[in-house]
């Protein structure tokens, strides 16, 4: 009877050792997967940091360019407004000069007419 118990105990022991070996093997495989995924995660994290840095630089550059473009727009608008005022002033000046020329011509005609009347 003792030998039967001993044989059964030895069989259980062997199965237990096999189960432990399987568990250790599965754990080792799982650890390799974990390490692989952690490495991939770290690589992705570094890539994200690099991309975030690039994005920040691009956003800064873009903001500066937009500000300069807005200044261009303001300068163009101010210049166009001033130019329109110059055109309007030029038109007014031209009209005034034309009226003055007509008035001077009439004065000259009247003066010539008066001169001719005195001669007669």
Image: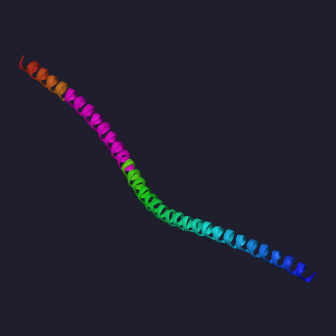
Q: Is residue 79 above or below residue 12?
A: above
How far across and how far down the image is residue 36, in percent? 57, 66
For residue 117, what is the image quadrant? top left
Residue at 88 percent of width and 81 percent of height? 3
Residue reaching furthest to the left: 119
- In reply to whether residue 21 is colored magenta, the answer given is no
Question: Depth check: 39 or 52 in front?
Answer: 39
For image coordinates 38% across by 45% down, the residue present is 77
* Residue 105 in which image quadrant: top left
The percent position of residue 6, horizontal first and vertical second, equals: 86, 81
**Residue positioned 22% across, 28% down in the render:** 103
- The quadrant of the image that shows the C terminus is top left
> Colour scheme used in the picture?
rainbow
For the point 53% across and 63% down, which residue is it?
44
* Magenta-highlighted residues: 74-103
Q: Residue furthest top?
A: 120
Q: Main secondary structure of the magenta part?
A: helix
Q: Position of residue 63 (x, y in %)?
A: 44, 57
The residue furthest bottom is 2
**Quadrant hosting residue 113:** top left
């Amino acid at each position: 009877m003792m030998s039967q118990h001993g044989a059964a105990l030895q069989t259980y022991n062997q199965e237990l050792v096999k189960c432990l070996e399987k568990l250790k093997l599965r754990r080792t495989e799982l650890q390799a997967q974990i390490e692989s995924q952690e490495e991939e995660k770290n690589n992705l994290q570094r890539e994200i940091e690099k991309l975030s840095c690039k994005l920040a630089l691009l956003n800064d550059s873009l903001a500066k360019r937009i500000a300069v473009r807005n200044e261009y727009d303001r300068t163009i608008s101010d210049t166009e407004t001033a130019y329109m005022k110059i055109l309007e002033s030029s038109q007014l000046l031209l009209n005034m000069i034309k009226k003055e020329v007509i008035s001077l011509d009439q004065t000259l005609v009247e003066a010539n007419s008066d001169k001719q009347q005195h001669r007669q």
